[in-house]
Image (cartoon, coloured by chain):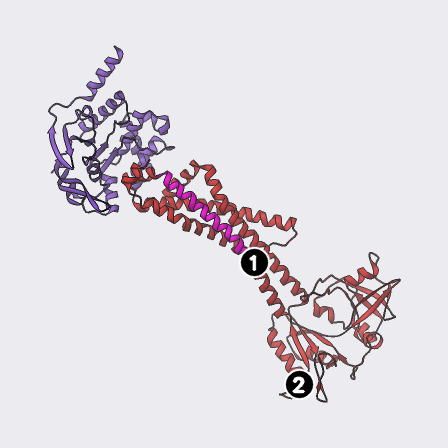
Chain colours: A red, B purple
Amino acid sequence: MNIWESARIAVRALRVNKLRSVLTMLGIIIGVGAVIAMVGVGAGAQASVTERIESLGSNLIVATSGSVTSTGVRLGLGTQYTLTEDDAAAIAREISAVQVAAPSMKGKGQVVYGNLNWSTDVYGVTEDYLEARDWPLDAGRPLDAHDVDGATKVAVLGQTTVQKLFGDSDPLGQIIRIQKVPFTVIGLLAGKGESAYGWDQDDVVLIPLSTAKKKVLGTTQPNPRSVRKVEIKILPGDDMDEAEAQIRALLRQRHRLQPGDDDDFKLGNLTDVLETKEQAAQIMTYLLAAIASVSLLVGGIGIMNIMLVSVTERTREIGLRMAVGAQGRDILLQFLVEAVTLSVIGGVLGIAAGLTGSRAISHFAEWRTLVAPDTIVLAFGFAAAIGIFFGFYPARKAARLDPIEALRYE
Amino acid sequence: MALIVIEELTKDYRLGSHTVHAVRGLTLRVARGELVAIMGPSGSGKSTFMNILGCLDSPTGGRYLLDGEDVAGLSPGELARIRNGKIGFVFQTFNLLARTSAVENVELPLIYAGRPARVRRARAREVLAAVGLADRAHHHPSQLSGGQQQRVAIARALVNDPAVLLADEPTGNLDTRTSVEILVLLQQLNRQGITIVLVTHELDIAAFASRVLTLRDGRLQRDEPVLSPRDASVAQAQLEEEAVA
């Protein structure tokens, strides 16, 4: 007897007890559906995290002015600005993997418009800053070289700052005061959301670096060219670690550090943060999948239960089939195919349920869900495997019946 | 050579600590074309003997040759093959598959013989016609009378051209009229050359056989030929006369 013949007999047997078959399948439908929907939720969260971190710039290396040792006292990070605008220019010029290197200063500033005021982060930046940060504008124009060279009093505002100072009115062209210095608003930044570390990146005002040094943040540094940070964007496809090593070597050379000396700057990139966050999201995905798998397992036990009942009910049928020449393996195959048919049909319906479920979650809970084809294949394969695993014991029980006993069974 | 050759056949069962000797040394032969009735009270070993004869069970000792093949020491798988090809079973309770049409019930042994579907269907219809149920091929057992169900079961037993038809109390669940009807069919088949072994506890039924074997305590007590077996079709005519009167 071949598989096809067994499948025909199986489908016929399942149709005899339609309600029972459907209820048994329901276990698998819910199990497979839950696995697909939950993995979808997990993968969606993972993708959002990745995207959020990429919004910070995954190919960004940040050089921060470091500690210096002044007459034997090691001062903390950033107390003295060791990096300079010339360092930034040298990095951009000499390292081929660098797309752009943007020096910047940062300080807290009180920003006033009309009778509203707001304390925010004021960044002194160059025309390269937005490119380094992958930060588009919503409206207006960005700072350009002319603004930076001429130390003009213009500002580009982040979304949060706009909201706090202007509400719904149009800020473009308006005059705001930063530390009492009047600035014209020329551009509005697109929303960037929370950073990987959890602060609001939109709560910001960007002004030309030169203007910041002269008029707003002042400079307490001995060197007027010094800056707090250089944001360095690496060309896509170039190796981050190698670029970081080259930047380190260049800065050490420019700062005339001896081989044994500590760095007087700090290099960091967001790849590490990205990896940690992604790992966390992945763990969540696994956890959700594990919980959902439990329901699939319960569905499998349901199949086993119903198959055991079925074998008992059909003992005489089994005895008769054996009397007319069925071998043990024919009976085994018949019941195994029946169990697998239940789980496979349940699996197909479960995939439909899972896809519908994850759509519904996206729609109503407004969570992003992402159902990958391999999840579907995996869930389906798992369902079929459950049919074989939980169907085997009842099928073997049927195959091992003694035909004489089975024929006599009432 | 005889169709069935049985020599010093024994069957023991272990029931806990003691052994039950169900069959204690049977020796007999059944020739082709015989209609043998096996009789005996319960506990005589007749069921055990039928199970061994039907290759559902293996003997503990002795020889059993069926159609020239020694089946005493075969594995369960090989026994299944013998049951499929050489033996047709007819049971007291018919044992038809419910919710399965008559023709599909008849096809069942052919499925396990590995015949293709078209061949199966054609052969099953042919045999159903031979037992007089051509017009009932697509009826389910629940739509058939007891006599018709037993005819379907006989058709199923015949579908693989077996060497022997084993009927275990085939009329046990039927009324007198229908019993005679079935006996008419069995005698017809026997006249066509089919060997039949029939188990019964009714002398009336045994009277239709050409030979009666009586078992007692696992031994052959009597082995008598029936000099003039009753003709079932005559019995049927008599019954009909009585019904008219």
Which chain hosts label 1? A
Mark with earlier residue (2, 1) = 2
Answer above or below: position of A69 versus A306.
below
B107 and B187: which is toward the camera: B187
Q: Quadrant of residue B234?
A: top left
Which chain is disc 2 placed on? A
Where in the figure is residue A210, as x and y percent of width and height?
81, 76
Q: Position of residue B146 (x, y in %)?
A: 31, 25
Give me the disc on residue B144.
none
State the residue at coordinates (46%, 39%). Answer: A20
Q: Amino acid at mark 1?
A: Thr
Q: Where are the magenta residues, as a range? A: A286-314
Q: Is residue A83 magenta?
A: no
Locate residue A317 relative to residue A209 in the image: left or right: left
What number is the disc on residue A253? 2
Locate residue B242, reporting x and y percent.
24, 13
* Residue type for callout 2: Gln
Query: Of residues A159 and A129, which is closer to you in this image?
Result: A159
| Crowd class of label 2 (few under 14; some 14 to 19; many from 20; radius 10 Å) | few
- In what element is the residue under mark 2? helix
Q: Which residue is mark 1?
A: A285
| Image quadrant where residue B19 sits | top left
Quarter that holds the N terminus of chain A = top left
Question: Which residue is outermost to the front?
Answer: B17
Secondary structure under the numbered disc 1 in the rendered image: helix
**B118 left or right of A375 in image:** left
Q: Specify whether disc 2 shares its chain with disc 1.
A: yes
Q: Main secondary structure of the magenta part?
A: helix
Residue B133 visible somewhere in the drawing: no
Tell me: residue A253, above or below residue A9. Answer: below
Quadrant in which residue A147 is drawn? bottom right
